[in-house]
Image (spheres, grey):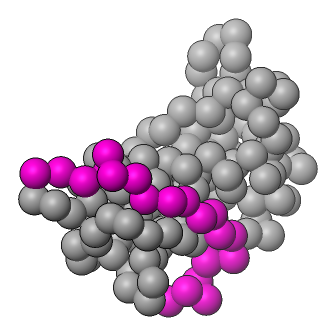
């Protein structure tokens, strides 16, 4: 399953990531997904304040597969599942030690900063995201 993901981000679990049940909370897992999405987007499109287009999360689906507990490191594997005209779909697997504890799929839409409407992404971005499929 790890081989499905060509791009990796590593994050440290924090005590504040836990909830009343003692495990890492679903909202913290969503934040881990966001960290991975941010890194893969920046790797291709550059930093948010440097790119000519903005991006918006259109949809996210997370499947929680196992509990995880503080402390530890999480590795977030990401791959581009689809490259559209103005959007990409990112597939992710989240791992603690050898356990895949969650998977996610997110749709990111690139938008024109002035009109705030979806706009075609530059061809260089399309090529860069395609390499991470």
The one nearer the camera, 16 or 59, is 16
Residue furthest right as drawn: 124
Vertical position of residue 47 compared to residue 72: above or below: above
Q: Residue at x 60, y 16 (%)?
A: 116
The one nearer the camera, 112 or 71, is 71
Residue 131 position, x and y percent, is 79, 70
**Does residue 126 appear in the picture of this structure?**
no
Residue 8 position, x and y percent, is 65, 69
Number of marks in picture:
0
Q: Residue at x 61, y 77 (%)?
A: 5
Whether residue 121 sits left or right of residue 39 in the image: it is right
Residue 122 position, x and y percent, is 84, 41
The one nearer the camera, 35 or 37, is 35
Residue 25 position, x and y percent, is 24, 54
The one nearer the camera, 26 or 112, is 26
Q: Residue at x 54, y 33 (%)?
A: 56
**Does residue 114 appear in the picture of this structure?**
yes
Whether residue 22 sits left or right of residue 116 in the image: it is left
Residue furthest top as drawn: 114
In the rendered image, which quarter is residue 119 located in?
A: top right
- For residue 123: magenta? no
In the rendered image, which quarter is residue 133 located in?
A: bottom right
Vertical position of residue 117 compared to residue 33: above or below: above
- For residue 12: magenta? yes
Q: Which residues make up the magenta segment?
A: 1-20
Whether residue 122 sits left or right of residue 112 in the image: it is right
Q: Residue at x 58, y 38 (%)?
A: 109
Vertical position of residue 102 compared to residue 58: above or below: below
């Amino acid at each position: 399953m790890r081989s499905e993901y060509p791009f990796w981000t590593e994050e440290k679990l924090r005590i504040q990531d836990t909830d009343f049940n003692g495990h890492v909370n679903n909202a913290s897992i969503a934040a881990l997904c966001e960290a991975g999405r941010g890194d893969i987007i920046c790797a291709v499109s550059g930093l948010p304040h440097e790119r000519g287009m903005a991006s918006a999360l259109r949809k996210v689906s997370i499947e929680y597969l196992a509990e995880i507990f503080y402390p530890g490191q999480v590795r977030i594997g990401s791959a581009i599942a689809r490259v559209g005209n103005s959007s990409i779909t990112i597939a992710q697997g989240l791992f603690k030690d050898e356990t895949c504890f969650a998977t996610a799929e997110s749709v990111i839409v690139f938008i024109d900063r002035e009109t705030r409407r979806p706009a075609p992404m530059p061809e260089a971005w399309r090529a860069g995201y395609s390499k991470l499929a």
